[in-house]
Amino acid sequence: MESIWNHFAKQHPVVMSQFGNSPAFNIRSLGGGITYLKISSIDSNLRQQLESHMNEIVHSKGLIIDLRNNGGGNSAPGSWFAQHFYSKPTTALERRPSANVPWIPEILQPLLPRISVPTAVLINGEDWSSAEMFIAQLEAAPNVKTFGSRTMGADGNPVFYPVMNGVEVKISSWQERVTSTGLPIEQFGITPEKEVQESYTDFLKELSLSYDNKGSAQYDDVLQKANVWVRSKIQSSD
């Protein structure tokens, strides 16, 4: 099933071209001690951007990390950030270069300062490549819950091979699987713990509206569900 974002992009390419100039990283407060992080791509500047806000992130009461419509990039900053969610070495992913060799665990080593607050991660069908790796590394943490819809299922570091007359094929250069489920990311994607279907009508409204003074979008069902969950976890721990 085609995602709402992809459908809109095909119908309105001029409007969507404006989103290409939006920042890859954005941070704001949603009120009540909840910090919202929007990460649209995983570029080489992400670690520096996160480090500059780490004090704010660590001292939040709750986090919402919005990874929707993230096409990936450099996997290293995502892995580095995910390591702050763990208190002991943890394997979230396993990798192998071909089907004829054993799986190799990718171990996340804990880093300080630790992020232990309730954290919601928002995902959808336009997440692929290293964004899916990042999601898998985050969702294995005990304080993280994913919301939204299944990711694309295309994280295999594709390599282009020429065939003939300028035609190329794209083939994954490795396989990865999620340790907790044993399922490969390629073709399967990552299914959120809490599935929330996006409404196309609400999606269109959301594009035309600014955020209210609390930073939460009135028509963003996924964000709203995540916000409710984070606030409930905060209240239960008070």
Image (cartoon, grey):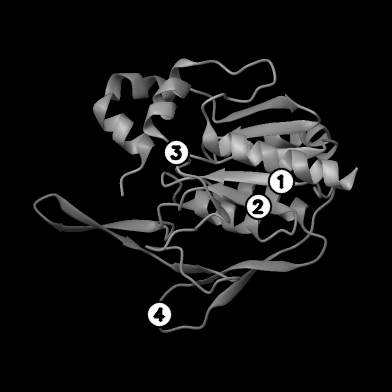
In the picture provided, is 31 more to the left or to the right than 154?
right
Q: Which residue is mark 3?
A: 198
Say which of marks 3 and 2 sits in front.
3
Q: In terms of sequence position, does the residue under pointer 2 or pointer 4 come before the other?
A: 4
Badge 2 marks a residue whose secondary structure is: strand
Badge 4 marks a residue whose secondary structure is: loop
**Residue 214 drawn above or below residue 179:** above
Say which of marks 4 and 3 sits in front.
3
In whole angstroms, how far apart are the C-alphas of marks 2 and 4? 31 Å
Which kind of residue does numbered mark 3 sit on? Glu
Q: In terms of sequence position, does the residue under pointer 3 or pointer 2 come before the other?
A: 2
In whole angstroms, how far apart are the C-alphas of marks 4 and 3? 36 Å
Say which of marks 3 and 1 sits in front.
3
In the picture provided, is 6 more to the left or to the right than 32?
left
Q: Which residue is mark 1?
A: 119
In whole angstroms, how far apart are the C-alphas of marks 4 and 1? 35 Å
The reply to whether callout 2 and callout 1 are in contact (CB within 8 Å) is yes
The reply to whether callout 2 and callout 4 are in contact (CB within 8 Å) is no
Q: Which residue is mark 2?
A: 145
Which kind of residue does numbered mark 2 sit on? Lys
User: Residue 3, located in which quarter of the rendered image?
Assistant: top left
Other residues around mark 3 within 10 Å, as few (<14) / some (14–19) / many (≥20): some
Which kind of residue does numbered mark 4 sit on? Ala
Other residues around mark 1 within 10 Å, as few (<14) / some (14–19) / many (≥20): many
Q: In the drawing, what numbered circle is on residue 99?
A: 4
Residue 167: horizontal and vertical position, in percent? 15, 52
